[in-house]
Structures are given as structure tokens and as C-alpha cells.
Image (cartoon, rainbow, N blue to C red):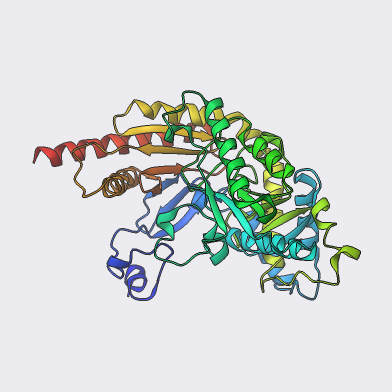
Amino acid sequence: MNVRDRFNQYLLHPWADLPNLGQDSETPELARGTGVYVYDQSGHQLLDGPGGMWCMQVGYGRQEVAQAVAQQIGTLGYASAFSVIHSPEAELSERIAREAPGDLNRVFFTTGGSTAVDAALRFCQMANNIKGCPERKHILARHQGYHGSTFLSASVSGKERDKSSMDTVQDTVHFLSAPHLGGHPEFKSEAAFCDFLIDELEQTIARVGANNIMCMIAEPVLGSGGVIVPPKDYNLRCREVLKAHEILYIADEVVTGFGRLGHWFASETLFDLVPDIMIFAKGVTSGYLPLGGFVISEALLSTVSGEASGGNIFSTGYTWSANPVSCAAALAVWDIIERENLLTHVQNISGYFIEQLTSLESLPLVKEVRGMGLMAAVELEPPDDLTGSSQLDRDYALGDLVDRCCYERGLIVRPLINVCVLSPPLIITEAQVDELVSKMRAGIIAAEEALRLTNEV
């Protein structure tokens, strides 16, 4: 049996297409990667537009990471965070605390973004119980926000189609509008739209009751929701409203952290806010090994530790919390980012990246290009005569077609329905940006031509 036969017979992948389970013939089979490129089993070179899944910060095939991992496995391949400590976790936590916003100095390691969100929410629950306000159970989140796939993290994710067939917490989670001006043509200015969003937040707090709300969780820039860059001052104004009501603020920087926007973290540097808790994952190891976590503010931690703890423990953890091999990989990635000045590189190249992508808006199938740093979205708009029983069907059909056309030309775009999200490795050069945009333009034009020929038949 070859790889695809085994895949069809034995594997169940994330977001599996259940109606066609076991019949796959199109999912790319990758064999290797180097720099910003991956290669399929036939040797076909592909520029990785989405950077894996928002995570391939330093590119593929980094021998420094491989050597650090091999050395750590040979020295200490495993250690239980429940009972021992080790050097890689200590050094990594110090580096993260040094770059985290404000007084966020205490790091809790998990296995990825979903478990980090889950554990952070459990910490907030525990904190309110210890402080004598157990009625604070409600959570504010946003439509189109994405925070993970565990029961709790999926419950606070605002992409309804992702969880429509599964049970989630509903009575204590309240969703606010996505901060996407393009989805609200009734507002003529960004400032007016921002005022609407803040008014909605205040009205929701009044309706639910501030004393019943535990926290709000939000991405500085929405990633899987379609790379939605919020209005100016929106994040900060949310933080100020929440702080006035003593509602905790969790910044989910799983995507935006570790250089994606040109800084270690975005909350304070780009949006002028210091959250109570900040989530990280993905880019911390550049996707080489699983690792995630959250950082807690000293102000919050002081309310539940020492004499204030009431003798309680934070009874959450994972077999692979602070795994020494994953931490060693993260330290090697950190060293590469610093040595190669990748934060400065992202700051310098991101304007060119967004500008070149924006030129695609001249194509009939492109509705909007939006982005910040090295993360962007190219939203496609299907023509009226594209066959499909619903708008969603037409969006899916167009996304799939553009995906195939780009792949044939050597580019991975990973459409989320009709939105092609891009977050290439931070090492991408201007010439490679040109290559990405050129191949994407050719792929979209080819898709348009395929639709024209289909309609002529």
C-alpha cells in the first residue's frame, strides 16, 4: 500500500470530509521542505503561502533546530512538569516573560494553542472561585474568532460552521460582532464602526451583568476568521471597558506572536494594551514540535497565590507540559529569530507584502485583500452564474477551484471556504513575495478562465 492508500484506510484527519471519507485523491502528499518551499512526492516545488498553519516562522529544514532537538533527546528527552524542573523550560520562560507585555511574568506551558486557551479559562474560573465571586462564569468572545478545538476553546470560538455538529457551552458564552468594517457597509467610517462595537460591548455587559462575567477572550488580529484587522483603538477601548468592570482580558496571540506582526508579541507594542493573560503557541517552535502556553500578570497572580490562595492548587496540567525537547526547539527558533533579525525584517517587508497582494483586487474574482504584518487574506467573490444551491456552496466551489489552480502553479493558499489566508515564513524575501503574488494572480486568472469555459459549455 502506498501513502494515500494507507491514508484512506487508516487515518482521520482534522476537519475530515466525512461524506467522502476514504476516497481522497487530491490532498497533497508532502515529502520534504526547505526555506519557504515544500515539495510533494513527485518533486513538485510549492511556495508555502500559509506557512504550515500560521506557524512556520523560520522556514523548513533548519538544521539548528534539528541539532538542538537531537541534543536534547540525547541529554534529557522527557521530564514531568508535575514533579521536576529542567533548564530548557526555565530559560524559555524567562525569555517569554522578558518580552511579554507589562507585568505578564509567569508562564504556564501546554501542548498547543487549544490546550493553552482551555487552561487559561480554567485559571480564570479558579481565580474567581478563590476570590469569592463564583458567580463570574460568563465569557465574552467574538463572531469569527477562533481559539481552538477542545471543548472549552471550541465553545468560545465564533465560527459556527466549525462546531455546528458538536455540543458546546452556550448559556455562559456571549458573542460580539466581528470587528470587520467590510462586513458592515452601513457604517461610513472606521471611527463610527468602532463606536458601535464598543457600545455593543457595553450593552452586552449591562445585559449579562458585569458581576457575572469572568473574562473576554480576543485575538489582536483575527486569524482563521479571515485575517480581520480591527479598527484603530478598538482593542484598547475594549480593554478599558473591561477593566472598569473588573472583567479579565485574555489576548490570544497564538497567531500574532513570535514575529508574525514584526514583534515578539502584538498586544502592547502595536495595540497599546496589557492583558491579564496572553496565550501563545504555533510560532514558538516554528511548528517543529508541539508547544503552547499562557503568561499571567503578576497583578492577577497575586490575588490567588501566597496567603491569598486559601491553600488551593492550580490542578491543571499535561503529560507534555514544558516538554524539554519542545522547549529546546523553541530556544533554537528564538535564537534564529534574533540572529537573523527577523523581527526587523518583517517590519521592513510587510508593507511590500500587503501592497503587492492588494494589487490582486483588480481581478474580478477578488473581493478584498486585507492584512497586517506577514498575515493577509485574499477574499474571493464567486460570480453570480457559478453553480451551487447556496451562497456557501458557491463560496466553497470557488475556494476549491482557486486552491487547485494555485497548486498547479506551485503555490499553497489553503482557502478557508472563499478566503485564502497567507502567513508565509518570516524569512520570505521580496523576490519570493513577487513569486507568491505572481503565482496567485495566475491561479485566480486560471480559475476565472475555467469558470468561463464551463459556462460556455
Residue 60: where, in percent of width, then height? 54, 51
Query: Horizontal placement of 130 versus 196: left or right?
Result: right
Residue closest to the eye, 229 or 167: 167
Q: Is residue 283 above or below residue 114?
A: above
Residue closest to the eye, 293 or 103: 103
Q: Residue at x 73, y 44 (%)?
A: 243
What is the quadrant of the N terminus in the image? bottom left
Q: Is residue 128 above or below residue 266?
A: below
Q: Is residue 349 above or below residue 89?
A: above
Query: Horizontal placement of 442 versus 275: left or right?
Result: left
Residue 47: where, in percent of width, then height? 44, 44
Residue 339: where, in percent of width, then height? 71, 42
Whether residue 346 is visible to the viewer of this picture, yes or no, is yes
Query: Horizontal placement of 164 versus 372: left or right?
Result: left
Residue 8 falls in image quadrant? bottom left
Q: Residue at x 67, y 50 (%)?
A: 210
Residue sitting farthest toward the right: 307
Q: Residue at x 76, y 69 (%)?
A: 314
Residue closest to the eye, 333 or 395: 395
What is the quadrant of the C terminus in the image? top left
